[in-house]
Image (spheres, helix red, strand yellow):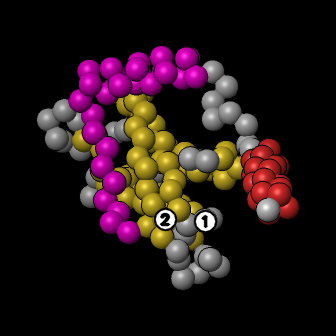
Amino acid sequence: MKSIIFAAVLSALLAVAGSVYVGIKTFDGPVTEHPYEEGLRWDEQENQRDALGWRVDLANRVIRAGDNEIVLSVHDRKGFPLDDASVAVTLTRPSTGAYDMQYRAIRGEDSLYRLAVVFPLYGYWDLRIAVEQKDKRVLFEKRVYAEKGAHSGE
């Protein structure tokens, strides 16, 4: 009976040790180096969005791992397209910064902003969308899920 209890306790300890080892080896570091300052910046951006009334909508219904065309609409407080804006998008994975990429959107004649984006892996991604017009700059965030793509190798 003692040997069974010993084996069970040893198995549990080895499982915990293995989990700690894997956690240490795969840890990318803190999500943000300065969380307080990031929170202040987030509040400032939220206030800026409210004050200007700008809105960004993602037209894509399905996103797949691999190549995609992302389509964004950018509107002012009254719902009119913000035609003379500059739109930049940073693609980032919530769990790591290893796949961060930056893109610039191009406005089409239909007042929609388009950009070709590569999602290297399926899963959740964050789109950090910077909209600039004259001396105003506002950040928006959209979380998307890239499904397994036919050509993504996954």
Residue 75: quadrant of the picture: top left
For the point 61% across and 47% down, the residue is 95
* Residue 28 visible to an observer of this rendering: yes
The foreground one among 1 and 143 is 1
Q: What secondary structure is found at the residue carrying circle 1?
A: loop
In this view, the residue in front, 95 or 97, is: 95
The amino acid at mark 2 is: Ala
The answer to whether the residue labelled 1 contacts the one labelled 2, judged by CB atoms less than 8 Å apart, is yes
Q: Which labelled disc corresponds to residue 121?
A: 1
Q: Quadrant of the N terminus?
A: bottom right
Residue drawn where x is 59% and y is 81% of the image: 151
Q: Position of residue 10 (x, y in %)?
A: 83, 55
Q: Is residue 125 left or right of residue 144?
A: right
User: Which residues are drawn in magenta?
Assistant: 35-62
**Is residue 139 positioned above or below 118 on the image?**
above
Provide the residue designation for mark 2.
146
Residue 16's place in the image compared with 78, above or below, is below
33 left or right of 47 in image: right
Q: Residues within 10 Å of mark 2 (few under 14, many from 20)?
A: some
The C terminus - image quarter? bottom right
Residue placed at 63% from the left, 21% from the top? 34
What is the number of the mark on residue 19? none
The local secondary structure at tag 2 comes to: strand
Q: CA distance from mark 1 to mark 2?
A: 8 Å
Determine the main secondary structure of the stretch shown in magenta.
helix
The residue depicted at 35 percent of the width and 25 percent of the height is 46
Is residue 127 toward the left or the right of residue 76 in the image?
A: right
